[in-house]
Amino acid sequence: MSTTISLDFTKLLLVGLLLAALYVGLNPKRPKHPPGPRGLPLIGNLLDMPTTDKWLQCRKWSQEFKSDIIYLKVFGTQMVVTNTLESTLDLLERRSSKYSGRPRIPMSELMGRGWSLALMPYGDEWRAHRRLAVKGFDAQVVPKFNLTFTRNAHGLLRRLLKSPEAWHEHVRHQVGAMIIEVTYGLNVLPKNDPFIDSAEKALAAIAISSMPGAFLVNTMPIFVRY
């Protein structure tokens, strides 16, 4: 019985997707978007998305289409990529009331990251969280961290003098150490600190969860309940 129900659901899903693709293909009234690579039915630009160095590919598209703003779509996720500081400031600062919203990422919510200010949708709750963040790190508060900043800067310089070839690892460690000390008041280990490792793993998981097309639930949020 369960197998029959599963097969019926799969058939209905496939039929629905085909009808949606047919509708999109035949519908002459399409919204105007910035230029970008032409995608395929249903999956959009999924096959165009690079697995590494995405910023380099986006820059190539910007040059190819002679536009600072590029449009991409993967399944149901629409993306607008800004390739210059001017276009970024124009959309996100000068016209922030229109373009400051954030897309919902159901997979991040399932991972327990819905509370994050960076992922939270624009609204009253986001504004309340932002006020607290600004209050804790505004221009009047930051000077109290000067000693922490100076100590970490000296630590970075000592590491660079000792082994300049490992500069990337030194910068990674010292920046992580400074953030953890300022945020939580904790001092990290000189090497292989568990707090820094945990933070980097969390950031990597968030990045993967928000990748377009990586999880079906991001395209079809209805699957959150299952």
Image (cartoon, rainbow, N blue to C red):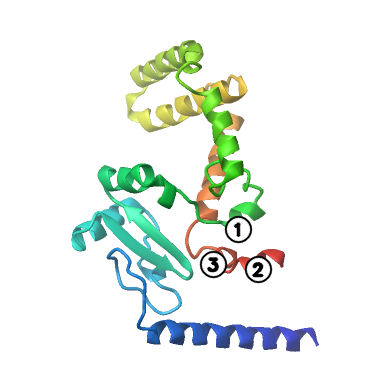
The circle drawn on residue 35 is none
Q: Is residue 116 among what the camera can see?
A: no
Which residue is identified by label 1?
A: 106
Q: Are marks 2 and 1 in contact (CB under 8 Å)?
A: yes
Rendered location of residue 104, percent (x, y): 55, 56
Which amino acid type is shown beneath numbered disc 3?
Thr
Residue at 54% of width from left, 67% of height from top? 219
Is 12 placed above or below 221 here?
Answer: below
Which amino acid type is shown beneath numbered disc 2?
Phe
Rendered location of residue 88, percent (x, y): 32, 46
Disc 2 from disc 1: Cα separation: 9 Å
Dot 1, crowdedness within 10 Å: few (<14), some or many (≥20)? Answer: many
What SS does tag 2 mark? helix
For marks 1 and 3, the one nearer the N-term is 1
- The C terminus is located in which quarter? bottom right
The circle drawn on residue 223 is 2
What SS does tag 3 mark? helix
Which residue is identified by label 3?
A: 219
Is 81 placed above or below 89 here?
Answer: below
What SS does tag 1 mark? helix
